[in-house]
Image: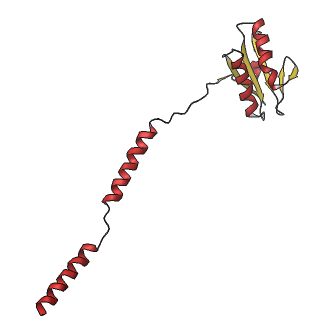
Amino acid sequence: MALRLRQSKLRQSKMEMSTHGIDLAPMLDFCLNLLIFFLITAVFVHTSGLLLNRQQNAQQQKQVNTKTIVVQIRNSGKVVMQDRIIDLGAVQANITHLHAVNPDAGVLIVAQKSAPTGVVVQVANQARLAGIYNITFATNQ
């Protein structure tokens, strides 16, 4: 009987010793799989940018070539071409007309300091839709 008690106590102590601790192998496998997944997917992330041609300052705007189509954007978001306010939807038509007169002309977009960025981007898109890819940006104080 004493022998059986010893054997049962030995079995219990062996079971208690084997149940202590946490097995980290599955967690390490999972982390390794996540690492591989993120490395593979990170290769396909591509950020696109916009190439800008900026003048040094607004004083150079006065020295602009006569073959340049100047589009001004005011702080209020109004678009001005040839000293008249035009609608944003009419920018493409006006640029197309001026480009037909001067085929070598580029577009200069002059935005005031607090002009809405969305309007600047829309004017640049309208110039590209008009077939002009020589677009320069400048700012006014």
**44 lies above or below 27:** above
In which quadrant of the rendered view does residue 71 lie?
A: top right
68 relative to 51 in the view: left or right: right
In the figure, residue 108 lies in which quadrant? top right
Could you tell me which residue is drawn at 69 percent across and 19 percent down? 128
Position of residue 31 measured from the top left corner of the image (x, y, whole percent): 38, 53
Q: How is the image coloured?
A: secondary structure
Q: Is residue 126 above or below residue 77?
A: above
Q: Nearer the viewer, residue 105 or 9?
A: 9
Q: Quadrant of residue 67?
A: top right
Residue 138, position as x, y percentages in the image: 72, 24
Q: Position of residue 99 (x, y in %)?
A: 75, 10
Q: Point out the image quarter for the C terminus.
A: top right
Residue farthest to the bottom? 1
Q: Is residue 30 above or below residue 50?
A: below
Relative horizontal placement of residue 46, taking residue 75 as reference (left or right): left
